[in-house]
Amino acid sequence: MTDTVTLDPHRNVPGVRRPGFAQTLRAEWIKFWSVRSTVWSIVALVVLGAGLTVLVCATSADDLADGSAGEAAGSFITWGMTIAQITAIVLGSLVVTSEYGTGMIRATLTATPHHGRVLAAKALVLTGTLFVVGTVTAVLGYLGGNWFLEREGIGLALGDEGVLRSLLGSGLYMAGIGLFAAAVGLLVRHTAAALAIVLALILVIGNMVVLLPGAWGEWATKLMPGNAGGVVATPVSFNPDLLDPWVGFGVFCAEVAAVLLVGYVVFRRRDA
């Protein structure tokens, strides 16, 4: 008597079943946390964001209390996040460009040929992490910095106008600026180039466009990504001529979405 074995060609055969979004998301999560740059960037974000906020509040509390600083205390309660955004930009760039630098992008697209799924998973891991870390960092800075402000009688309660919004807004802005950097990295595929473009756009050009004549300079300043998005992360902006917090953040989200869409189109066509 001869035994007959029936083989199922679709059972336990590598490459037949493509990973779904859950598997892609898990893979991106593992890649994200398996490199040292992620940990160091997160540590730097917390240290700079919370530490500098506490430091500037401690050294400025006297001047803020007697009015010689010429600024509101609310302008300083999340001050460190303006510097911490640099680490979010670095992390956002590396999420994309590091794979091109090592050649891992080929393995990624071989395992998951669906470009949109890969990009969505990267974006979700990056923005989720930066939102949580950014919000926690802003809260730590608020708690530490506000202690010095309260000693001078100018402390800010969570219920005061703009305070709670600025803490959550800090997380939202960190997530947005990181995603913006990732989108630029998708276009240029080079870490140094992505960092140079985004940092110049946020920290240099964003502060220089005001020199344009007339309404051009006024509106260009309002619409620059860093200026439009950053207002939501502070109770009182240093520049009162910028857009309202949520209006500005809406403009910022539209700008991020536009760059990300262009990046996705290029990613799909160039890296097919």
Image (tube, rainbow, N blue to C red):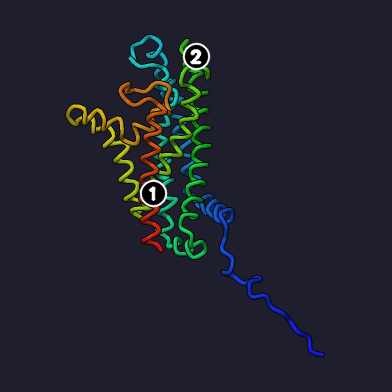
Q: Quadrant of residue 243?
A: top left
Q: Quadrant of residue 20?
A: bottom right
Q: Along the line of sight, which residue is nearer the eye, 39 or 201?
A: 201
Question: Under tag 1, what secondary structure?
Answer: helix
Task: Report crowding for label 2: few under 14, some 14 to 19, many 20 or more residues within 10 A (C-alpha).
Answer: some
The single residue placed furthest to the left in the displayed view is 213
Residue 75 coordinates in the image, percent (x, y): 39, 21
Mark positioned earlier in the residue sequence (2 or 1): 2
Q: Residue at x 24, y 28 (%)?
A: 218
Residue 55 coordinates in the image, percent (x, y): 43, 25
Q: Residue at x 49, y 45 (%)?
A: 126
Question: Under tag 2, what secondary structure?
Answer: helix
The label on residue 261 is: 1
Which quadrant: the N terminus? bottom right
Q: Along the line of sight, which residue is nearer the eye, 195 or 268?
A: 268
Q: Residue at x 53, y 50 (%)?
A: 33
Vertical arrangement, residue 216 with respect to residue 185, above or below: above
The label on residue 46 is: none
Q: Amino acid at mark 2?
A: Glu
Q: According to the image, label 2 marks what residue?
A: 150
Mark-to-mark CA distance, 2 and 1: 45 Å
In this view, the mark in front (2 or 1): 1
Q: Amino acid at mark 1?
A: Leu
The single residue placed furthest to the bottom in the displayed view is 1
Q: Residue at x 53, y 32 (%)?
A: 136
